[in-house]
Amino acid sequence: MTTMLLQVGAVWASNLALAWMVGACTAAFWLRNEGTGWTLRCRLWLQQSCRAAALVCLAAYLLVLWAVAAAMADVPLSEAGAALWMLLAQSDYGKAAWAAAACLAALAFWPLSPGRSLAVLVAFAFSRVANSHAAEQGLLTLPLLVEWLHLLLIALWVGGVAVAAWVVLPASAAGGGAAPDAYLRKLSDAATLALAGIVATGIFNAWRGLGKLDNLAATPYGVALTVKLVLVALAVALGGYNKLRGFPAIVAGQAGARPVVVLVLRIESVLLAGAVLAAAVLTSQAPPAFG
């Protein structure tokens, strides 16, 4: 139980850190042509937070590997050192882990531009899914490519919402500037595109993992998936409000619109963090169709 809890918690932290990095880098990229004082400070902070998140993600990923080694060797965490070294040194799992760690080290310690950071994050995400159930048929297969795209799109949506809610819009208000209209349009378009892709890739993954609809209620995997879907549906409703009402109200300069949008975004970010936790639980469960 301790091993499973560590694995779920570490996967959750790793995925949240990945989402933050994607959100921070995309926001910094979208704001790159803005020359106002608050945007310059905001971009600098976003880039620094991306480096900090890379360190958090690296630490969480090492904990994931520790838990996986303990589970594979069927030993307590305190006795998993030898198993972890064998996993890293003598398996394809270890090769993918080293590649993922190298990507995170580059993000943490090299001064990369937002665009290059996003390219490294794409490579990191591929290394991550190379050690998932999706890779059981090999690399460059349809299940793995779909899972790779699914992970990136979730990171784009979750990270974009979180960064807008907790950094960009509050920074624009504190800086006394108008709301960044171009940024809001790009955020809205990106979230819509990400959601469409998440639905498509999620249906594929659910069909592949569940095997049949009865498993939604009859297995721990299905229950976790159901919780994830409910949280995502609530987040979609809030995102729809901002897209149709909130963001246009800010662009039109309506009084009091920005605080409402920020509140809705923050609630949405909490719901999405819960969905990411449910997804982390899914990774600890064998899909029913694979049993």
Image: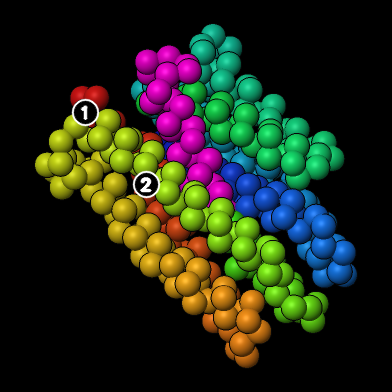
Vertical side of 89 occupied by 20: above or below = below
Q: Amino acid at mark 2?
A: Val
Q: Residue at x 50, y 68 (%)?
A: 243
Task: Please give the residue where the numbered disc 1 appears in the rendered image.
Answer: 289
Residue 149 lies in the magenta-colored region: yes
Q: Name which of mark 2 and mark 1 comes first in the sequence.
A: 2
Foreground pick, 269 / 28: 28
Task: Count residues near mark 1 (Cα–Cα under 10 Å), then give few for <14, some for 14-19, many for 20+.
Answer: few
CA separation in Å, label 2 and label 1: 20 Å
Task: Count residues near mark 2 (Cα–Cα under 10 Å), then give few for <14, some for 14-19, many for 20+.
Answer: few
Question: Could you tell me which secondary element the residue under label 2 belongs to?
Answer: helix
Task: Please give the residue where the numbered disc 2 appears in the rendered image.
Answer: 199
Question: Could you tell me which secondary element the residue under label 1 belongs to?
Answer: helix
Q: Position of residue 256 (x, y in %)?
A: 60, 88
Colour pattern: rainbow
Q: Amino acid at mark 1?
A: Ala
Which segment did they paint magenta?
Answer: 134-159
Quarter placement of the C terminus: top left
Q: Position of residue 233 (x, y in %)?
A: 34, 60
* Outermost residue toward the bottom in this view: 255
Report the side of 282 relative to 116 (left or right): left
Q: Which mark is residue 246?
A: none
Main SS, magenta residues: helix
